[in-house]
Image (cartoon, rainbow, N blue to C red):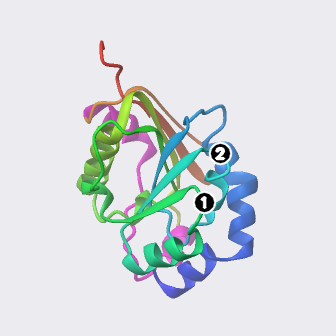
Amino acid sequence: MNEKHLTLCSSAEWAETVERWIIPWALESVDLGDDVLEVGPGPGLTTDVLRARAQRLTAVEADPELAANLTARLADSNVTVVSADATAAPLPDGRFSGAVCLTMLHHVPSAAQQDALFAEVCRLLVPGGLFAGSDSLDSPEFRDLHEGDVCVPVDPGGLAGRLRAVGYIDVHVDTNEYALRFRGRKPPRDY
């Protein structure tokens, strides 16, 4: 993340945006259960909101420095931070009741790696577990904020097919003026 972007994603202004707009819209009418996986928490402003919604929250963060800071900040809480690439997380199959990734998919370096992340999250979910999330829509302003960063925007028109291709069912994708949100469920055992 470039410095300007990291500063924004660590700011009080962004914390308010996450709490008032992003999470309520992305997770509207969603029950993630008691044991939740968060992919790509960055500095953890989304984690701060999510940890109040789950009995246990495991946050997988690829950046070792951000993971270490989050681990120190959330010690003695219901959050476990794992410093790892979410496309190959060192976690057991079928552990999580739900999973979420919020405004981070565009930081995954390619569509193929995004698909690998989707598949890995599906592996980590219990049968019937829900994966939900959001990301920003592509725009010139969005690209400016990410100058010098990895920035691979997700096309909302193709996202449902990509999620189905790696095994999700009951897939829904929709957009507002600024963002996309998605939901997909790992099939139950008898599917």
Q: Residue 133: tell me if it is visible.
A: yes
Q: How many marks?
A: 2
Tell me, yes or no, whether the highlighted magenta stretch contains residue 4.
no
| Amino acid on which the number 2 mark rests in the picture | Arg
Tell me, yes or no, whether the highlighted magenta stretch contains residue 160.
yes
Q: Residues within 10 Å of mark 1 (few under 14, many from 20)?
A: many
Residue 27 is tagged as none
Q: Residue sitting at 70 percent across and 45 percent down?
A: 24
Residue extending farthest top: 190
Q: Residues within 10 Å of mark 2 (few under 14, many from 20)?
A: some
Q: Residue sitting at 23 percent across and 53 percent down?
A: 112
The secondary structure that most of the magenta stretch takes on is: helix
For the residues labelled 2 and 1, the Cα–Cα distance comes to 11 Å
| Amino acid on which the number 1 mark rests in the picture | Thr
**Highlighted magenta segment, given as a residue range:** 140-165
Percent across and percent down for residue 126 are: 37, 31
* Quadrant, the N terminus: bottom left
The mark that comes first in sequence, 2 or 1, is 1
Which residue is denoted by mark 2 in the rendering?
A: 53
* Quadrant, the C terminus: top left
Q: Secondary structure at mark 2?
A: loop
Q: Is residue 88 above or below residue 45?
A: above
Q: Residue 103: tell me if it is visible.
A: no
Q: Is residue 5 above or below residue 123?
A: below
Q: Secondary structure at mark 1?
A: helix
**Which callout, 2 or 1, points to the residue nearer the camera?**
2
Q: Residue sitting at 54 percent across and 79 percent down?
A: 6
Percent across and percent down for residue 103 are: 52, 58
Q: Nearer the viewer, residue 123 or 72?
A: 72
Percent across and percent down for residue 25 are: 67, 44
Residue extending farthest bottom: 3
Which residue is denoted by mark 1 in the rendering?
A: 46
